[in-house]
Amino acid sequence: MTTRIVVISAGLGEPSTTRMLADKIAASASKALGDAQVEIVTLRDLAHEITDAGLTGFAAPRLQHVYDQVMSADALIVTVPIFKVSYPGLFKSFVDAMDSDAIVGTPVLLAATGGTARHSLAIETSLRPLFAYLQAFVVPTGVFASPHDWGSAGENALQRRIDRATGELASVLRGGGTGRSREEDIDLFSDTMLSISNPDLR
């Protein structure tokens, strides 16, 4: 049976680095799983429907189709921009209008973009608690990308984090836990601290 993965991209701009990150993670997940069917949803295109759903309590057909995709997915990849250490209101409104039990037990990979590495802990402080409330199964490695990560100096480190996270997601979907070793945890910590401590990012 083909594995279905839904990727939520909550970027507000056009073009969007959040969508760029979503595409990179989707490509890595497809490679890790081999036979995955990956669908990418851009919330910016649904902004009016999301706002109306928050005001009326009812999702228009196009938005309801997305919620149906999310509820039937084998796994989710969620990518959001970070502003002032939190996700944007459009993403929160999308989640607020979703059934509270929609993703109970669903494996989820969390990712975020930000204009500075000072936002790098937002995945842990803002996103992870939200998905804990929703009772999703969040894989250990979150993927954060700052402007440094899109340049030649940081791109390889970003791809390593992406591949590690999608490897965990693939392992969970195959029933093998996260597949992480202590050595991989140490490497991840080193990559993250190097990015945060880079003086060019302050």
Image (cartoon, rainbow, N blue to C red):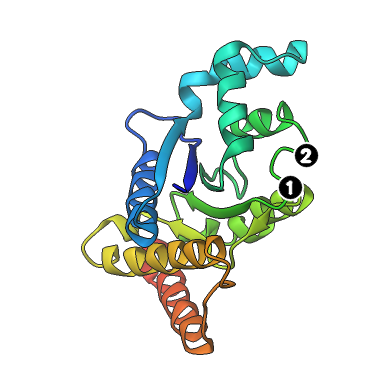
Determine which of the numbered discs, if any, sits on residue 101 in the image: 2
Residue 153 placed where, x, y %? 24, 67
Q: Can residue 198 be seen?
A: yes
The residue most toward the front is 1
Q: Is residue 120 above or below residue 41?
A: below
Residue 143 placed where, x, y %? 47, 59
Q: Is residue 194 above or below residue 112?
A: below
Residue 45 placed where, x, y %? 46, 20
Residue 140 placed where, x, y %? 59, 68
Question: What is the crowding at mark 1: few (fewer than 14 residues within 10 Å), some, or many (at least 20)?
Answer: some
Q: Can residue 18 be seen?
A: no
Q: Does the CB distance between marks 2 and 1 fall below 8 Å? A: yes
Determine which of the numbered discs, if any, sits on residue 104 in the image: 1
Q: Quadrant of the C terminus?
A: bottom left
Tell me: 162 left or right of 67. left
Kindly identify the residue that appears in the image at 64 percent across and 36 percent down. 71
Residue toward you, 80 or 148:
80
Q: Quadrant of residue 87?
A: top right
